[in-house]
Amino acid sequence: MTQVKRALITGITGQDGSYLSELLLEKGYEVHGIIRRTSTFNTDRIDHIYVDPHSEDAKLFLHYGDLTDGTMMRRILEQVQPAEVYNLGAQSHVRVSFDSPEYTVDSVAMGALRLLEAIRDYQQRTGLEVRYYQAGSSEMYGKVQDVPQKETTPFYPRSPYACAKVYAHWQTLNYRESYNLFACNGILFNHESPRRGETFVTRKITRAIARIVAGKQDKLYLGNLDSKRDWGYAKDYVKAMWLMLQQDQPDDYVIATGETHSVKEFLEVAFAHVNLNWEDYVAFDPRYLRPAEVDLLIGDPSKAKTKLGWEPSITFEGLTKLMVEADLEAIGLPVKRNENGNGNHIDIATIRRDVAG
Ligand code: NDP
Ligand code: GDR
């Protein structure tokens, strides 16, 4: 009888955690996720794949824990005995990390260290291999030194969040070299989806568009519109995480599309999809500026393409439209699709007429 593979995911309730869980379940894994105790439910993104654990069909199990609590992390690791650990949990908002640097560093940097220490001890004691994925970020490149950014480009982090991710990156590499752990760093550039957190700029924009079309909002306040990001699709990016842990040797990989666009370009494409001009709706609010900005990110995914056989599946325009349409549908507005399943350009007057009718 073949043994079912078990994976443990921190940050399972987040954007990436939910897509990765779907992927691993499809591949026949038993998936265990760590969730934080909150006063209201925080499992919206994974509710559709959750089955009552009393059922024989249950393949997804949740455990209360927190990356700031090393005892809990060790206990869960011992209990689950996973073959793979994906460390996705983080205070992941760059702007918020300036307001809350200690907590950000505790969860991101120390959180990774706690997990690595727990895995090291568990592996040494039991002799069972645990493969580890560290969710690194293009924010580690920070101040532009070299474009496009690749695995060998030096880091220059520009926020408490990015400094913490650099620490976690180097510890992961050190545990690989010191203790022979199968530990990989993914250096993932921005990736988005309809499940993206509502305060990240892409989702903030597409959600506002749906609310504007629905007549529930008339202004969208943003900060710096000139920064450029390499935006990909989250569903593609979680595949790369899994692929890294299936290789013969652990390594570090840049995951990106190789294209960059400004926030302004995202606004243009997203608003044009509902035939609106973004300049009529967007206003500036200095609250959304960061004390130090990352101006330009563009990744070189050649290594991932060659060694992992990984490819992004969707263009910048395709991703933008996908997100606009998902937010229109989420708010109850109709999206007309052609036979290929693609939404057409949407006319705001038609939508208002359809809704009224
Ligand atoms: P999200 O912000 O959507 O999700 C973060 C997850 O971490 C949530 O499940 C959250 O739980 C959990 N979390 C937060 N604090 C703690 C803590 N102290 N202990 C345990 N869990 C915690 O992030 P994404 O899914 O977008 O990103 C996943 C990972 O990848 C993160 O580490 C992020 O920094 C990194 N990354 C993301 C990129 C992107 O573009 N999305 C690019 C590069 C790296 P809760 O739901 O309770 O808040
Ligand atoms: P980022 O994503 O900081 O790149 O980190 P975010 O969407 O927050 O910002 C992208 C760019 O947009 C500018 N911006 C605004 N950003 C937000 N959030 N809100 C605004 O109102 C606004 N106006 C302009 C920002 O200044 C920035 O230049 C994301 C996170 O997912 C990290 O966890 C991850 O590591 C990196 O991507 C790769």
Image (cartoon, rainbow, N blue to C red):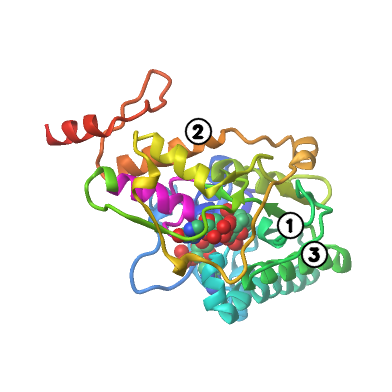
Lower position in the chain sequence, tag 2 or tag 3:
3
Furthest-top residue in this view: 339
The label nearer to you, 3 versus 1, is 1
Q: Is residue 157 magenta?
A: no
- Residue type at the position of mark 1: Val
Decide which of tag 2 and tag 1 comes sooner along the chain: 1
Q: Residue at x 43, y 48 (%)?
A: 49
In magenta, the rendered stretch is 193-211
Quarter placement of the N terminus:
top right
Image-quarter location of ligand 2: bottom right
Does residue 50 appear in this view? Answer: no
Quadrant for the C terminus, please: top left
Whether residue 160 sits left or right of residue 208 in the image: it is right
- Please give the count of numbered marks on the rendered protein: 3
* Distance in Å between CA atoms under marks 2 and 1: 27 Å
Tag 2 secondary structure:
helix
Query: Which one is nearer the viewer's eye here, 55 or 67?
Result: 67
Q: Residue at x 19, y 36 (%)?
A: 352
Residue 298: give x, y in percent of width and height.
69, 47
Residue in view at x 47 percent, y 50 percent = 202
The amino acid at mark 3 is Gly
Disc 2 or disc 3, which is closer to the eye? 2
Q: Nearer the viewer, residue 258 or 227?
A: 227
Viewer-closest of 121 and 164: 164
What distance separates the C-alpha of mark 3 from that of mark 1?
Answer: 43 Å
Residue 127: which numbered mark, if any?
3
Task: Return the residue at label 1.
Answer: 144
Give the numbered dot on residue 318. Answer: 2
> Vertically, is 102 above or below 263?
below
Rendered view: 355 above or below 68: above
Q: What is the three-letter code of the residue carrying label 2?
A: Gly
Query: Residue 22's spot in the image, x, y percent?
Result: 51, 45
